[in-house]
Image (cartoon, grey):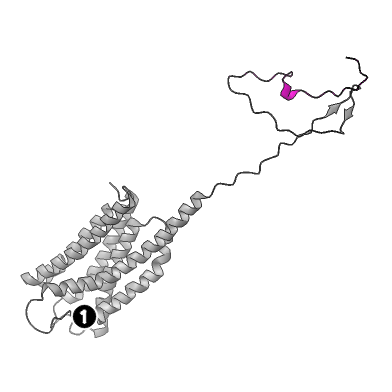
Amino acid sequence: MWGNRGPWWVQTLVSAAILVAFAAALVASLHTMESAGTGSWVRYGASAVVPFVFLLITAAWARSGVRLALVLLVGLILLALERVAILPFYLDSSVIADWDARALDTAAMANIALFDSGAVIVWSIARRRTPATWLGVIPAAGVLALGTWANYFHQPDFGVDLTSEGTLPLGYFVGVVAFEMAFILVAVLILCAFDGIGLAMRRGASTVPPQGPPVDDFGATQLYRTQAHQTDQRETERYRPPPPPLGNRPPARPEDPSFRTTQIRRPDDRR
C-alpha cells in the first residue's frame, strides 16, 4: 500500500516513472490547451489539474500514513499559493494596466518558485528515509532559485518565434517543460544524495557491535586452612564460579566438588 514496500530498485523505478509521467502530462496538457484555443479562465483551472494529480499520486506513494496526510496538507497549501501568484496574468488587461512591472515580475517568479519548490518539497516529504535529507535543503534551494531566474529571464525559445501568431508546436512545450523539470530533478537528486548518506551512516552504526558492561574477572581467593583451623593465605587460587544450575537440576549440595575447600595436611598428620 505504501511506498516503502518492495526492493529498493522497484521503488526507484516507480519514483522515476511518476516523475516522467508528471512531465509528460504537463506537456500534453499545455499542448492540448494551446491547440484547442481554450479561454483564459479555462486554462487557469485546467493548468492546476496535472499538479493536483501529481500531488495525489505522490501522497499515495508516501512511506507512511502520516506522511500521506502531511504531503496533502503541504501540497495543497503550496498549490493554492501558486494559483494566487499566477492569477494576475489571467485577469483582464485593463485591471493590471496600472500595475508596476516589478509587481508582475515578482508574481511571475513567485509562480515558478512555488511550482518547482512545491514538487520538490512534497516529493521529499513522501520519500525521504533519514533526517539527513534536510541537510541538502540549502544547495537544493540554490538550484531552485537559479531555476526560477533562468526560467523567467533566460528561457530558450526552442526555435519558435514567440511574437508570431498561430499555435505553438508540440516541440516548444517539450522544451519548456524539460528546461524547468531539469532544475526540479537536480534539486530532488541533491536531497536523495543526502538521504543516501544518512542511510549509509545509519547502516554503519548498526553494524558496530554493542559495547557491553565491563566483564568482571570473577576473581576469588580461596582460603586454605590448616589443621588448627587457622587461616593460611600463603597460597591462593583464582577461579571462575561454576555455571548456574539448569532448571531441572537440583541445587548444588555442600559436598559438590565445586564448593569444596582444599584441606592442606601436614605430612605427619594422621589419617
Asked whether the viewer can see residue 133, the reply is no
Q: Amino acid under label 1?
A: Pro
Is residue 270 in the magenta section?
yes
From this viewpoint, which residue is outermost toward the right?
268
Q: Which residue is mark 1?
A: 156
x, y (%) of residue 238?
76, 34
Q: Residue at x 91, y 15 (%)?
A: 270
Please tell me whether residue 214 is drawn above or below residue 49 in the rendered image.
above
Left or right of 216? Residue 157 is: left
Q: Please state the horizontal and vertical placement of residue 72, each as a whole percent of the image.
A: 28, 56
| Picture residue at 21% right of the left edge, 65% below the top | 23
Q: Which residues are magenta?
A: 247-271
Residue 58 sits above or below residue 109 on the image: above
Magenta span dominant secondary structure: loop
Exactly how many numbered labels are in the figure? 1
Give the quarter of the image for residue 257.
Answer: top right
Query: For residue 134, which quarter of the picture?
Result: bottom left
Magenta span includes 158? no
Along the horizontal axis of the image, is 43 left or right of 118?
Answer: left
Circle 1 packing at 10 Å, graded few (<14), some (14-19), many (20+), is some
Classify 186 as above or below 94: above
